Image (cartoon, grey):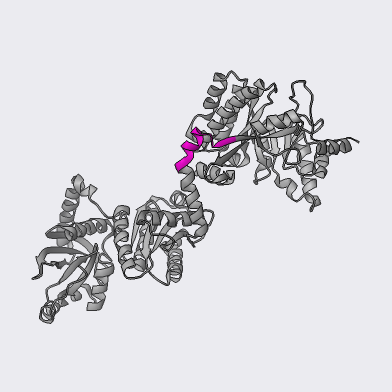
Amino acid sequence: MDSYEFDETQKKFIENSVIPYAVYLYVDRRVVTLAVSAGLCELLGMTRTEAVDLMNNDMYKGTHPDDIARVADLGYQFAVGGEVYDAVYRTKSRTGKYVTIHAHGRKVRAKDGTPLAFIWYMSEPLNARKKIEAEKQLAATLGNIMRDENMFHKNYYDALTGLPNMSHFLSLAQEAGEKAQENGNVSKMLFFDLCGMKSFNGKYGYSEGDRLIRTVGAILKNHFGSENCGRIGQDHFMAYSVSENLDDELNAVFKEVEEANDGKTLPLRTGIYVDKYDKIDVGMAFDRAKIACDTEKSSHFSKFTYYDLKMRTETILRDYILNNLEKALSEHWIKVFYQPILRAKNSHVTEEEALCRWIDPDRGVISPGDFISILEEAKLIHKVDLYMVDRILEDFETKKKEGIRPVPVSINLSRVDFFMCDIVQEICKRMDKARMDRSMISIEITESFAEADAEFLKIQIDRFHRAGFKVWMDDFGSGYSSLNSLDEFDFDLVKFDMIFLRSFEKSGKSRIILENLLRMTKDLGLETIVEGVETEEQMQFLKDAGADKLQGYFFDRPAPLPNVIERIKTGMCFSADLPDGTTKIPEKVNESLKKAAK
C-alpha cells in the first residue's frame, strides 16, 4: 500500500474542524500524515504545512526527554497492530514551557479496508493543581510501564534520545533501502562515533555525557529525520540517506555538533557505505560503514570517510582469515620460519628468531602485516602464538634427530596474549611437557606494550624471569618512550628496530644516534641486537660501535626448518651447530668477514 487519499469533501471537513486531531496512515513502517485539523494547527501554533512536516519527520519534537521513548513506543505499537492509542506526555508549548498533552486514538477502516489512525490531542495548562494531577497520572503510567516486563522487551526506541534502537532502526533502513532501489535511488549507510566519550564522562560527569548524546541525537534527527537515524548504544549512532548532497549535509552536522552543548562537545567521526559494490543486507552495509569509520581511529576532529574498494578487499581478507583460522592451525598452513641471530665478534649463531608465516593453499602467502593485526583486533592472536610454541618445540626434536644442536629461539608475543589467557603458565606447561629447558625460548615484547600497560607488564616480566625465561624488548626506537622503558623495565636484551639503518647511507645523524644508544645500553648492562642489517658497511659499523649481536638479510633470510637444515648441511647459511661443532659460513659473507677482521 503506497498511500490513501480522502475525497475533497472529507478532507475539507477534517481540515476545517476546530477539534485538534489528525489522521495518519502507516506505510513501510513510517507515519504518513493524511490530514490535520485547524484545531491541531492552532494548538501547535503552526501552519498546516508546518504541522504536516512535523508529524511526518519529527512527531515528538519538543517532547520532554523522559517521555520520548515511552510515547514513541506506544505509537509504534498502535501503528503495527494496536486498535487504541492512549498517551499522556509533556511537550513544549509556543511559550517554551512544558504542557501536558493527552493523545487518544483509534483505528478506523476506510471503505476500501485501509486502516486509518485518528488521534485527538488535548492540552492542559500546567497550573499548580493540574500540574500535580498531570504528574500523578504520568507517574502512574510510567510505573505501570516499568513493572511490565513485556513492554520492556518490546521497546523499539532508545530511552535516552528517543531515536529508534538498533533492531528497529535496521528494520526501518532495510525497508527504506528496498524502496530506494525500486525508485532507482542509491542507498547510503552512515555510522557515527563520538570520539573520546570515556574521557568526556570523566571530565564533566555522566549527566553531561548524557546531555551531549541527546544533543547529537537531536542534530542527526533534524538532518536525517526521526526514522532515518538511530542510536545503537553508548556513543554510536547510525543513519540512512539517499541524499545527493551528503557531504554538505555532514559538514553542516559537524558544525552544529562543534557548537553544541555550550561548547562541551566531542568530534563526530563518520563512516559511509554507498551500496554500489554488491547488494548486501542492511546489517552488513552498516558493518562496512563502521569499518570506514574505524579507519580514522587516530583522528581527533570530525571527519567522514567513504568505504572504498581497498577497504572492501581488506574486509574480504579479514573475513577469510577469521573464518579459516582454525583450519589454518589444524592443517599447518601457518608455519614457523627461522632467521639466525649472530654474535658480532665471531659470527656464530647464538639464537634464532621464530617468525610466523601463513602459506595458504588458495591465496598463497598472506603477509604477517595483514593477518596478525586482524587476529589481534579479534583477540585470537594467542591461539597462533601458542601454536608457534608447539611447533618450535617439535622443531627442537627434529634438529636433534638430524644431528644439529638447537640454539635458543626467540618468539614474539602480542600484548593481547596476556589478556586472553595466562600466557606465562601456558608456555611453561608446554615447555615442561616437552622436557625442554626454559632457557631455550626467549620472549620478545614490543616497546608499544611497555608504553600502554607499564605496571601490568612489570608483573609479567617478573613472572617470566622467575620461570627461567629471558625477556627482550623488541622494536626499540620505534616509539617515543624508549629511554624511559630501559629504566623502568627489567629487560635482558634490547633489540634495535631496523628504522635506525634505513637512513644509514643518507644521514650521518642516524650513525651518531645509534652509536651513542649502543654505548648507553651497554653501560646499563643490557645485551643488544641490531636487526635489519643488509650491507657489509652496516655490519662493519655495528661491530665497531659495540653491538653484541646482528640480524638481517645480509646474513640470511627467514626460512622454514627443512630449508634451514639443508642450508646448514650444505654450508649455505650460518650455524654454530654442525655435528662436528664447526661453523660453516656462506662464501660471500665469509669474504666480508675476512675484510672486517683486518
Q: Nearer the viewer, residue 361 or 106?
A: 361
Q: Is residue 12 left or right of residue 240?
A: left
Q: Is residue 278 left or right of residue 471?
A: left
Quarter of the image holding residue 355?
top right
Residue at x 76% of width, y 26% of height: 576
Q: Is residue 266 left or right of residue 520?
A: left
Figure quadrant of the C terminus? top right
Q: Is residue 528 above or below residue 402?
A: below
Q: Nearer the viewer, residue 394 or 454?
A: 394
Residue at x 66% of width, y 41% of height: 475
Residue at x 14% of width, y 76% of height: 6
**Is 252 in the magenta?**
no
Q: Main secondary structure of the magenta part?
A: helix
Residue 227 shows in the view: no
Q: Nearer the viewer, residue 138 or 423?
A: 423
Quarter of the image holding residue 223?
bottom left
Q: Residue furthest right?
A: 598
User: Which segment is the magenta one?
Assistant: 323-335
Q: Position of residue 427 (x, y in %)?
A: 55, 26
Q: Position of residue 257 (x, y in %)?
A: 43, 64
Q: Is residue 535 above or below residue 225?
A: above
Residue 305 shows in the view: yes
Q: Position of residue 524 (x, y in %)?
A: 74, 33
Count numbered badges in the picture: 0
Q: Nearer the viewer, residue 479 or 537?
A: 537
Residue at x 73% of width, y 36% of height: 529
Q: Position of residue 95 (x, y in %)?
A: 26, 71
